[in-house]
Image (cartoon, coloured by chain):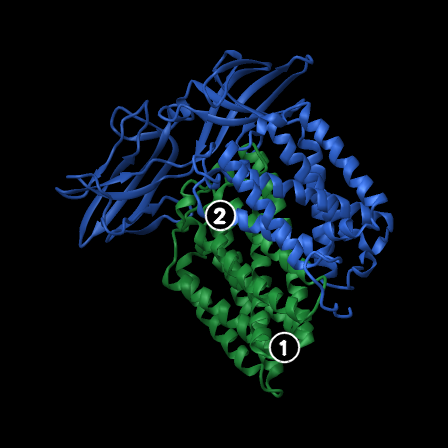
Chain colours: A green, B blue
Amino acid sequence: MTWNDFIYFAIPAILMWVIAGILVYAKKTARASEVLMLMGIAVFTAFIIGFWIHIERPPMRTMGETRLWYSLFLTIVGYVAYKRWQYPWLLSFTAAIAAVFVIINLLKPEIHSKSMMPALQSIWFIPHVVSYILSYAMFGSATIGAIILLHKKNQDKHIFNFTDNMIYVGFGFLMLGLLMGAIWAKEAWGHYWSWDPKETWAFITCAAYLGYIHIRLKRNKKTNNLALWFVIIAFILLMITWIGVNYLPSAQHSVHVY
Amino acid sequence: MPQNKKRNIGQFPWRYPESVLVTGSFILAGFILQSVAGEFNFYLLAKPVNYFITGFMVLLCITLGLFCSKSKFISWFSGVEMSVSLISALLFLSLIMGFTPQTTHSHSLFGFDAMTSSWAFVIIYLLTLLSLGILTVRRLRHFQSRSLGFYFNHSGLWLLMLCSGLGYADMERYIMHVREGETEWRVYNDNNQMKELPVAITLHDFDMDYYPPKLAIIDLDNGDVLPTTNPDFFQIDPDMLQGKLNGWKIEVEEYIHQAVRNSDSTYQEVSMPGATPAIRVRATKDHIVRSGWICGGNQAQLFMTLPLDDKTSMVMTVAEPRKFISDVDIYTQSEKKISTQIEVNKPVSVDNWTIYQYGYDNKAGRLSSYSSFELVYDPWLIPVYIGIIMLMFGSIMMIWSGKGRKEAINDME
């Protein structure tokens, strides 16, 4: 299965996700919405597996390839979180964002060659990337929660609880990704932490979410708002870490491609 | 938690205003110190100073955490508000670092261009270590098994920060160049100064393997890959024998990964260091058919192109390396002899040294007559790894329980 086949999987997946995101709001069709969501995930997963087999290396080398995983994880996290917390907006927002990332990949595919430089050939490569992208997906859904909370005058305890949980679990994956990256760096580049621009930004992102977690240990109305703003700023910093770093003048010599 | 009555700043219990004020003052003091005294010299911490500081830090955390935990000052210093302020301070300093290109030695007034050796960063780092250490000891006094995640995360981070920060001064990195068949123990540091090490390496053989290269069509006038605006490549792939390249239909008739040229300009498979990839293709466009061998060449063999018309030719790109392997014997002063292969991502550890594949003669490629190694000495690596593993356990516990039960914050008040 090559990149040329992507469109035959991408379009059905997008359609199923978007329709699922609409149907979830009506009680009668909520069941159908779940089925559609899962079918979309299955179709998308099938493509990733086929593509992986074809290129004979994990499809995680280029920015476009990480977007594939982001779409997949976001829909999975969105579905599981919806089942757990019963918020329809979770399903529709995650479906919409996943669809946007798929469309970006359709319009701006990147070179998907088979070669992978020796430093990337490590057992830490897959868990490092998967763990990170998974945490990004969770932080994405936590951010949606935070925006809804800031928008409402009356803060809904359940949504706040959801945001807390997403950030705790997301932070666990973020730390695992970072630590596995450190072990890998020791094996490949001689030191576990070199303040490579990507590492500096990973540290920044980490500190921002750590700040949120600590603010939430003592709660009152003022710190609640501060905490919610931390979630939003942290997510902006996260996006810079993931996508923006390569455009910064301070990061022209990073060893990270994405 | 009942809302506090109105209190003046500085009156205990201290909360956010005091924490932010104190942290901010320390950052400011760091900036002033930097502008007066210049950057912090990390190598002042080299052995035995860092051992002394480690001991002092441990004693301080234990004493303050165990015996002064009733003190309002200590509960504030290791409390939530101070931790948020310290984390925000680290966030602030690392943000400056993220936007400023970093160099090894600072040339700016406040040290923004070498943040990790600026006074402000070092001071906040030490304060964080102290606050974190005291809190961990305070919480360990009332051990609760349900706070296991807390202990793993906080003591793991403490160990990691302490040993990576202080251990940095004891780290040594050198480059060693070894010729095939020879034994070497002389190395060079960053400033190209030579040093003799207690580790010697004999290089038996250096070899590398390549990925199949790509095909491209170039403009014979200037050598640009066509189309110039968006160069097109055909990735050679034994599973995909057909494809398109800049309007030409490509059929792969034969691909030899390790090929040697015959006298009649055809190629045959020979596995030897001077071999290079070669391909026989058939290219078709508007009933024009071109076919023949294409080869990228190397130091030992000429390249071969397939002319398409007067102005363009099909060529092979330089292959990307898949693997570098050095076959070596390593000797140490402790009279160990290790026969092994060193590859990228597969370093070899012996005593406190880690030996990495570093480089080779780029122009010669597989024919390189030498191999370069990086030798890293890091005696603080083991406690750092213990810290990393503890943090990993802590992270897994966070994933497992989520926000879960409310952390036992109130016993800290």
Which quarter of the figure has residue B347? top right
Q: Is residue B168 above or below residue A164?
A: above
- Give the camera-side residue of A40 and B382: B382
Location of mark 1 (residue): A87
Mark 1 secondary-structure assignment:
loop
Give the distance between the C-alpha atoms of the residues marked 1 and 2, in whole angstroms: 39 Å
Residue found 62% across the figure and 87% down from its top: A27
Amino acid on which the number 1 mark rests in the picture: Tyr
**Residue A15 can be seen in this image:** yes
Residue carrying label 2: B96
Rendering coords of residue B321 (x, y %)? 43, 34
B68 to the left or right of B276: right
Extreme residue in the front direction: B8
Query: Residue drawn 69% across and 44% down?
Result: B157
Of the residues shown, which amino acid type is indicated by label 2?
Answer: Ile
Q: Chain of mark 1?
A: A
Helix, strand or loop status at disc 2: helix
Q: Is residue B118 visible?
A: no
Q: Nearer the viewer, mark 1 or mark 2?
A: 2
In the rendering, at what x and y percent does residue B259 appear?
36, 30
Residue A9 x/y as whole percent: 46, 66
Crowdedness of circle 2 by 10 Å Cα count: few (<14), some, many (20+)?
A: some
Q: Nearer the viewer, residue B31 or B312?
A: B31
